Amino acid sequence: MSRPLLVSACLLGLLTRYDGASKGHAGVMEWLRRHQRIPVPVCPEQLAGLPTPRSRTFFQGGDGMGVHEGRSQVISEQGDDRSGLFLRGARETLKIARLCGCDEALLKERSPSCGVHQVYCGEERISGLGVTTALLKSRGIAVFSEEDLDRMNP
Ligand code: SF4
């Protein structure tokens, strides 16, 4: 039986990005089709209650794990602290993963919510996790990005 896979909504062509666009990814769609996996689309930032379009955000002082531990923040372009909302979006995403029985996720690389290997701290690209990725991983969900498709189990 086909297993559900939590997927960043923007990778599936949904218009959820901060700028109101998508990041539809042909390789992701092909991988899902080839392996007959059922995508469960989630956008943690919309689940947080943020609007679309919305301000661009970036980390200050660390990555998404640091936000959970109170060591870093998610800051908007206007300088507002969005950490609480990003934590809310992460928790809502985890609820959906559990409701749908997802033990794996495929998330958008370098997003402050969904980044898997890298995120932006200010304008600098650093190794680190998005806020949602950090929570999912800490709860035993395996998280991959669109750049890991060749390493994922069908
Ligand atoms: S929060 Fe994740 S799913 Fe939503 S637009 Fe950003 S990268 Fe895509």
Image (cartoon, rainbow, N blue to C red):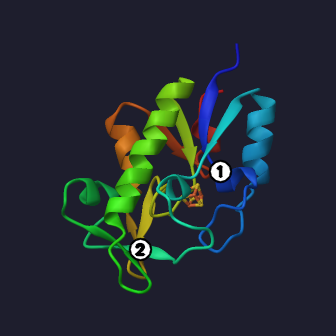
- Residue 58: which disc? 2
| 98 horizontally vs 79: left or right | right
Dot 1 beta carbon under 8 Å from ligand 1:
yes
- For image coordinates 70% across by 19% down, the residue present is 2
> In the rendering, at what x and y percent does residue 88 appear?
38, 52
| 84 horizontally vs 44: left or right | left
Tally the numbered discs: 2
Ligand 1's quadrant: bottom right
| 29 horizontally vs 76: left or right | right
> In the rendering, at what x and y percent does residue 144 appear?
53, 43
> In the rendering, at what x and y percent does residue 22 appear?
71, 63
Is the N terminus in the top left, top right, bottom left or bottom right quadrant? top right
In the depicted view, which residue is nearer to us: 114 or 47?
47
Residue most extreme to the bottom: 78
- For image coordinates 74% across by 38% down, the residue present is 31
Please name the amino acid that badge 1 sits on.
Ala
Is residue 43 visible in the rendered structure shown here?
A: yes
Q: CA distance from mark 1 to mark 2?
A: 19 Å
| Secondary structure at numbered mark 1 | helix
- For image coordinates 29% across by 54% down, the residue present is 65
Q: Residues within 10 Å of mark 2 (few under 14, many from 20)?
A: many
> In the rendering, at what x and y percent does residue 3 appear?
64, 22
Q: Which residue is mark 1?
A: 9
In the depicted view, which residue is nearer to us: 49 or 139?
49
- For image coordinates 36% across by 48% down, the residue present is 134
| 102 horizontally vs 41: left or right | left
Residue 7 in which image quadrant: top right
- Residue 131: which disc? none
Please name the amino acid that badge 2 sits on.
Phe
Is residue 102 visible in the rendered structure shown here?
A: no
For marks 1 and 2 on the same chain, the one whose residue lies earlier in the sequence: 1
